[in-house]
Amino acid sequence: MGTFNTFILHQPCAHCQVEIDQHIQFKYADTWQHTYHLGDTLEWGGNQTGNPAQGLVVLDAATEDCPHCGHDEEFYVVFVEDNRLVGAAPNQGRFHFEGDLTYALLPSPEPWVDDLLWGYHMQSLGLSASSTERDLVDLVRSREQPSARKLQALDILGHRPTLAAETVLSLQELLAGPEDISHGVVTVFSRLTSDQANFWLLPLLQGQSLVLRRAALAALSRVNHPGGSQKENTRRIHTDFAVPATAVDVQDLFQRHLHDADPEMVTLVIPLLGSLGVPLYPDDLLRYSPHARVRAAFIQQVREQVEADLYPDSDLKTIWADVMQMLQDPEPAVRQQAALGLIPFVRSGAPVPRLDEENRLKTVEHLQMHFGAEGAREVRAAILTVARFSFDLPMAREVFLLGARHPSLQTRMDVLQEVEEAFQTGGAMPSYAFRKDPMIHQVLHELSEEGKGEMEGLQAQAQGLFRRRF
Ligand SMILES: [Zn+2]
């Protein structure tokens, strides 16, 4: 006689339809008469069957007699998702268990499993498992339900593999409602097929609500994935593939929002245009934007574009001068991006020399001086990164030493971080050369010499790195 566990699920008996506490027996995890309910996490160890696995596992199971009609099911299955009990149903020949195995991993959920999980989610909402999309839509539209529950219902709808046309239409009406609900609807729409998503989301960009405009733009960028090697193909997006005339030029669309009054919209659009290969320099409205986050996003994108060789050589010197000037920005986030923006200009052995050697020296010298005066930790960290990429220059090496002697513990930690990065991925020279470099040894030596108690973690890290130097 074997032992088993019991999953108690409140549901109608498949035979008499009376709602009962169905007792379902299965052999999986620690098999020792444990009793579980829906959503419980399985216990492991002891008399163990299987291994704790992520994903979806289906278990061979059987039900005990119905207290009303005495009916039992010999072939039943229980579903475990990420080690939690999420549902059970008659097997009906869909699952076969090899030999003595009492469980099987499901590589990908089948549609009807999805329905089961869907039923489970419905129960968590206080609905019966046989409820439909219509029920969920009604729930979202009802006046009585709290908005947290409505959002939960929207989330479930968003995870359905498909939605009925009437569901989409009903949801569309909710876009005019309260912002948290309409935001939830945007998320649901962003999971529709791309032509449908575009059809419903594009008009929102012209709307009144800032929350919706931002959400729609973020969703549109996810849906259409511009960039990569398919740049050309992603220029046009369709709102309805049956009607080619509804194609929209995505670059055009994003460009129209590049100087939006809302800085959030602009920071969303900048990387989108960047990924489409649209040169952003010189755009003085971005460069001198009153919003620091716009300036930071601009300079970050320009750096990527310089790295990608998007600008002619004749532009590089003015870009460089501008980036240098942005190191004086009052906002640390902008100075940080400005420092990082200098990497392509000082990188040793860059595929294409961006600057002549004299200006390269001047840049690193400037950064070395700036490092001592810089008040923000994140900017100092960025300068350390630049120094790693220009480590062949004495001034860059000096930055590491200044960092190791800096009064800020955080900055000394950042030095270690940078040394670790150099050991792993290199910089101005390959990682093995960093490991053998006497200046790096000196830096690690200084950092591991400190005698204060608060420094123990730092010391241990520095000593650990020191041991890895050969
Ligand atoms: Zn029954």
Image (cartoon, grey):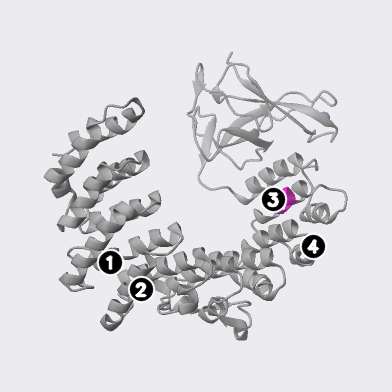
Considering depth in this image, is 135 or 415 the residue closer to the camera?
Answer: 415
The residue at label 4 has a CB less than 8 Å from ligand 1? no
Q: Measure how far apart labels 2 and 4 are at the Cα level.
A: 45 Å
Q: Provide the residue designation for mark 1.
A: 344
Magenta stretch? 151-155
Give the residue type at disc 1: Pro
Is residue 236 visible in the rendered structure shown here? yes
How far from the left and from the top, in percent, is residue 164? 73, 63
**Disc number lying in front (1 or 3):** 1
Does label 4 or label 3 sit earlier along the sequence? Answer: 3
**Disc number lying in front (4 or 3):** 4
How far from the left and from the top, in percent, is residue 98? 49, 34
Give the residue type at disc 2: Asp
| Residue depicted at x 49% and y 34% | 53
Q: Measure how far apart labels 1 and 3 are at the Cα level.
A: 46 Å
Give the residue type at disc 4: Gly
| Residue depicted at x 50% and y 27% | 100
